[in-house]
Amino acid sequence: MPDADPQSSPVCLVCKRDDQATPLLRLRYRGEALWLCPQHLPILIHDPTSLAGLLPGAETLRPADHND
């Protein structure tokens, strides 16, 4: 999937809300520009495999190690 069309408004990978509805964080993965809202950032950190089907290769990502 190539970078989003610069003329289109970015949306959260998960909830599809745009930057008029929520702040968006840009990330790059496998050469693609992707967007996540703060609500869904913890999913990427703690349970990335749940993004399978939305984020290519998510099933191979490991959750963060916690050393609390």
Image (cartoon, rainbow, N blue to C red):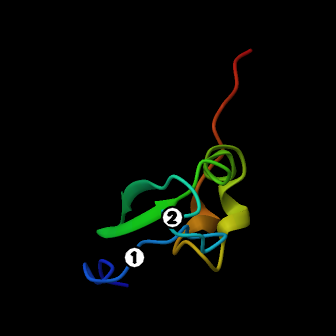
> Label 1 near label 2: C-beta < 8 Å?
yes
**Residue 55 as seen in the image, left or right of residue 27:** right
Quadrant where the C terminus sits is: top right
Give the residue type at disc 1.
Answer: Ser
* Marker count (numbered): 2
Q: Residue at x 64, y 80 (%)?
A: 53
Q: Nearer the viewer, residue 16 or 63?
A: 16
Q: Amino acid type of disc 2?
A: Gln
Q: Which residue is mark 2?
A: 20
Q: Residues within 10 Å of mark 1 (few under 14, many from 20)?
A: few
Could you say whether the residue bearing mark 2 is in a helix, strand or loop? loop
The kind of secondary structure element at disc 1 is loop
| In-front residue for pair 18/56 | 18
Instruction: Using a 10 Å C-alpha cutoff, classify the residue at mark 2 as few (fewer than 14 neighbours), some (14 to 19) or many (20 or more).
Output: few
Precedes in sequence: disc 2 or disc 1:
1
Q: Position of residue 64 (x, y in %)?
A: 63, 37
Which is more foreground, mark 2 or mark 1? 2
The answer to which quarter of the image holds residue 14 is: bottom right
Q: Is residue 58 left or right of residue 31?
A: right
Q: Position of residue 42 (x, y in %)?
A: 67, 45
Image quarter of residue 3 = bottom left
- Give the residue displayed 42% in from the left and 72% down from the top: 10
- Does 14 sit above or below residue 25? below
Q: Left or right of 25: which side holds 64?
A: right
Residue at label 1? 9
